[in-house]
Amino acid sequence: MPPPYPPRRTPTPRLVFLLDFDGTLTRHDTISALASLAYSHPTRRQPPPPPWSHFTDAYLDDLRRYDAHYATRAEQRRSVDEEVAYLRGVRRVERASVERVEGAGVFEGVTGEVVGRGAEEMVRRGEVGLRGGWGRMVRVMMRMGRGGVRVGVVSVNWSRVWVKGVLRAGWEEEEEEEGAEREEGERRGREKGSEDVEVVANELDVDGGGSLGRYWGGEDGGIWTGEDKARVAQEVFGVREGRWNGKISVYVGDSATDLEALMLVDVGIVIRDEVMGSSQVALGETLERVEIECRWIGEFARKEEGGVRKTLWWARDFDDICDSPLFSTLLDRASKP
């Protein structure tokens, strides 16, 4: 079954820039914020769904059981392939969690309109926040036109409408903070800015049926794992392993779910807070264990393009990325026919 919203047709870009959503574009994971919309929405279901903590606890219990029974312990997995195999196996945990939420009817009656409006309101109230510099980065790349750059979000989040609502409100908020006065035509162009970012994610039933959706259809067709993110990068955005040969690909992520995509692309960038969160710490420990170097993005030098050994780069936010020699190198390469 084809995806419900096929990717837009654009000229073949010279740079594909892909971003994870939760914890990368946003400062924190937003699934709980999304779930809060369901719990604040009136429901006729009897009995009503259990509290959200029931689902998070069940998910963590499943994850602990999976980890305890996996063939090798973390310290024994010393290669990227071994770690990827472990992460792919988490699929059944993710699917069980989705089915648990659907079976309880948590999102029954919650329409796409409710989700989109709720996302925008949470951004404006400061309950959901985007990392600094993301709008600046998108604006710089979009000036090159779609023939030069394609920017996309690849997310395991449960709602594409939610992601787009957060980006739309975040874009407007960032523009307003600049304090620039614009005429009406310029304002409309500003509002369209976030629409230049393609979002690929699952989609809950926008008519309020309660399903969390599967991007590829069927019972097991959801974007739930790092393997799925890598598949989207390849099938939707045309990413190929080429090491700076022809079209350049970039992926920005923050957690183990991003490992496979980070290793697939030409340039992998890891987001790290000054005080790293648990998922950031876990990814850092994994990279160290499988001996993948992750260096500060400001240390990039042009001579390192397409090196034999894979190196990842870390940044605190998108301002760090924009100010780095790596970003200027990417733009320079993408500007050349």
Image: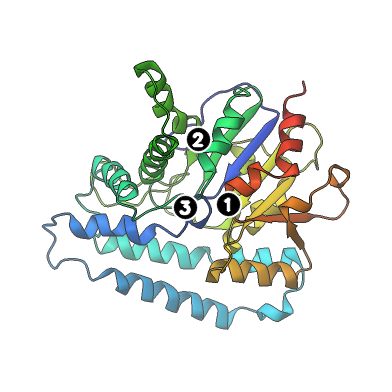
Residue at image x 42%, y 27%? 190
Q: Closer to us: mark 3 or mark 2?
A: 3
Q: Please give left or right for residue 244 compared with residue 202 in the image.
A: right
Q: Amino acid at mark 3?
A: Thr
- The residues tagged by marks 1 and 2 sit, at their Cα atoms, a distance apart of 20 Å
The vertical placement of 62 against 332, above or below, is: below
Q: Which numbered mark, 1 or 2, is in the foreground of this view?
A: 1
Up/down of 74 relative to 12, above or below: below
SS for callout 2 = strand
Q: What residue type is disc 1 on?
A: Asp
Q: Which residue is mark 1?
A: 317
Kind of residue at badge 2: Glu
**Residue tagged 3:** 26
Which of disc 2 and disc 3 is earlier in sequence?
Answer: 3
Label of residue 71 in the image: none
Q: Residue at x 46, y 51 (%)?
A: 222
Of 144 and 216, the residue lying toward us: 144
Where is residue 172, by image quadrant?
top left
Packing grade of label 3 (10 A; few <14, some 14-19, many >=20) is many
Of marks 3 and 1, the one in the foreground: 1
Q: CA distance from mark 3 to mark 1?
A: 10 Å
- Residue at x 39% of width, y 22% of height: 182
Q: How many marks?
A: 3
Q: Earlier in the sequence, mark 1 or mark 2?
A: 2
Q: Position of residue 277 (x, y in %)?
A: 53, 69
Q: x, y percentage for residue 199?
A: 48, 39
Left or right of residue 194: residue 278: right
Give the labeled residue for mark 2: 198
Q: Is residue 93 visible?
A: yes
**Circle 2 Cα neighbour tier, 10 Å, few/some/many (<14 / 14–19 / ≥20):** some
